[in-house]
Amino acid sequence: MQSSRQSSDKCGLLGPKSLLCAILAIACLTGTALAQSPVSVGPPIPAATTAGSACPALLQHTFLRLQDEKQQALCQYSGKVLLVVNTASFCGFTHQYQGLEALHAKYKDRGLVVLGFPSNDFSQETGSNKEIADFCENTFNVKFPMFVKSSVSGRSANPLFKQLANTTGTTPRWNFYKYLISRDGLKVSAFNSSVDPANPRFLKDLETLLSAK
């Protein structure tokens, strides 16, 4: 009891400065508690919200635009339903340009983007990029995005078509082979060259992907 009383006396609890001492003691204890409390820095930023992560891996490529050979990032089409087609100017299926452009015009407001990749893999696209661009515009009034001529099959295939082949297990066997890609880039369906853009089964699959959000 004596030691406790002496401690209290030192703090001035029995003297005229008791109120000031009490205030100082409370402040001291509060400061100690705050110093020992963990600092809250908030939850870590989810990987899905970091820059560029919204773009599916399938679209993380850059290609030169056919008309002016300016670089175009495919990530600009994230969240869209994509129809990727390898094209040629001198093929029995070249008339499908008309159907592809019709699809693009009809469904673009619902989120469809047709992407054309001219290729000479089957020896039916021998012209220059300018000649291909002029042919597409003047003959079929093509407005959907087109890219410079590249390979779409085998070891020299461009990186997008390599990924499409790995995903579907099939590579283009001829011009106007088609890959239909979901908005999240995770679902890919392949269609033979003979499948016309107006084919009912193809349109049903397209409608399904367009309806998914």
Image (spheres, helix red, strand yellow):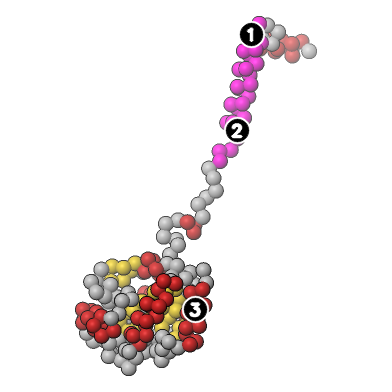
The segment highlighted magenta reads 16-40
- Whichever of labels 3 and 2 marks the residue nearer the N terminus, that label is 2
Residue 30 relative to residue 76: left or right: right
The N terminus lies in quadrant? top right
Read off the residue under disc 1: 17
Q: Quadrant of residue 154?
A: bottom left
- Of the residues shown, which amino acid type is indicated by label 3? Glu
Q: Where is residue 181? Give x, y as percent.
A: 45, 76
Q: Nearer the viewer, residue 102 or 17?
A: 102
Q: Where is residue 88? Give x, y as percent.
A: 30, 86
- Of the residues shown, which amino acid type is indicated by label 2? Gln
Read off the residue under disc 2: 36
- Of the residues shown, which amino acid type is indicated by label 1? Lys
Q: Where is residue 39? Give x, y as percent.
A: 56, 38
Q: Where is residue 99? Give x, y as percent.
A: 37, 85
Q: Secondary structure at mark 1?
A: loop
**Can residue 6 be seen in the rendering of this structure?**
yes
Crowd around label 3: few <14 · some 14–19 · many ≥20 (10 Å): some
Circle nearer the viewer, 1 or 3: 3
Q: Is residue 33 magenta?
A: yes
Q: Main secondary structure of the magenta part?
A: helix
- Whichever of labels 1 and 2 marks the residue nearer the N terminus, that label is 1
**Can residue 167 be seen in the rendering of this structure?**
no
Instruction: Name the disc covering residue 1, or none.
Output: none
Circle nearer the viewer, 1 or 2: 1
Q: CA distance from mark 1 to mark 2?
A: 29 Å
Read off the residue under disc 3: 207
Residue drawn at x 23%, y 71% as measured from the top left: 68
Q: Secondary structure at mark 3?
A: helix
Whether label 1 touches label 3, CB < 8 Å: no
- Whichever of labels 1 and 3 marks the residue nearer the N terminus, that label is 1
